[in-house]
Image (tube, rainbow, N blue to C red):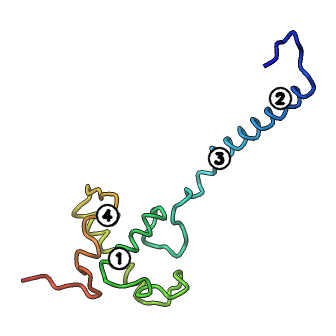
Amino acid sequence: MKDVAQGFSPGDLEASRYTSRVQTLFFALMVMLAAQDPARPQVGMVDVPTVKVLRGLTVPQFELEMQLMNQALGVGCAHCHTRNNFASEENPRKATARRMIEMTQAINKQFFPDYRPEAEASRFGKVTCYTCHQGSEKPKSPEP
């Protein structure tokens, strides 16, 4: 840095202006990011009209739930979804899956309201698709 007694050259003034502009742009960007509309969903949240039951999940949580359902029923995505159009309502199993999810949510709300799942566990609660299906498309009968 130059001594004040030596003075500033035109190049120093230009560099100072450039630095000031960069700082101003950076500050403006930070303000814009901080002032995002709170009515808009957070980045990474699943919030589309076709998702009716699994609301309020992040994309990774949503994908985990889908994987857990596949494993619980021993099926693939096409079991409930129409190939190449996951938003389609054509497959009647999708409506059945929604009713089953609502059933597990009601059971968990009534009987396990304080249950907190671990990181890789289902967000549904303690009772999940696996509780009854145990890897089979049809629910397993309870043992006598």
**Image quadrant in which the N terminus is located:** top right
Mark 4–mark 1 distance (CA, rounded to whole Å): 11 Å
**From mark 3 to mark 1, how far is it between C-alphas?**
36 Å
Mark nearer the N terminus (3 vs 2): 2
Task: Give residue 43's position: percent from left, percent from top.
Answer: 56, 57
Is there CB contact under 8 Å for labels 1 and 2?
no
Label 1 vs 2, first from the N-terminus: 2
Q: CA distance from mark 4 to mark 2?
A: 54 Å
Q: Nearer the viewer, mark 1 or mark 2?
A: 2
Q: For marks 1 and 2, give the CA distance.
A: 59 Å
Q: Which residue is mark 3?
A: 33
Depth check, front residue: 141 or 95: 141
Q: Position of residue 124 (x, y in %)?
A: 33, 66
Q: Up-down: is 143 above or below 37?
A: below
Near mark 3 (Cα within 10 A), the count class, few <14, some 14-19 or many ≥20, is few
**Disc 1: which residue:** 69
* Residue identifier under label 4: 121
Q: Residue at x 63, y 51 (%)?
A: 37
Closer to the camera, 138 or 112? 138
Mark 3 residue type? Leu
Provide the residue designation for mark 2. Answer: 16
Q: Position of residue 49 (x, y in %)?
A: 54, 73
Asked where in the image residue 8 lies, by quadrant, the reply is: top right
Tell me which numbered mark, 4 or 2, is placed earlier along the sequence.
2
Residue flagged by tag 2: what amino acid is it?
A: Ser
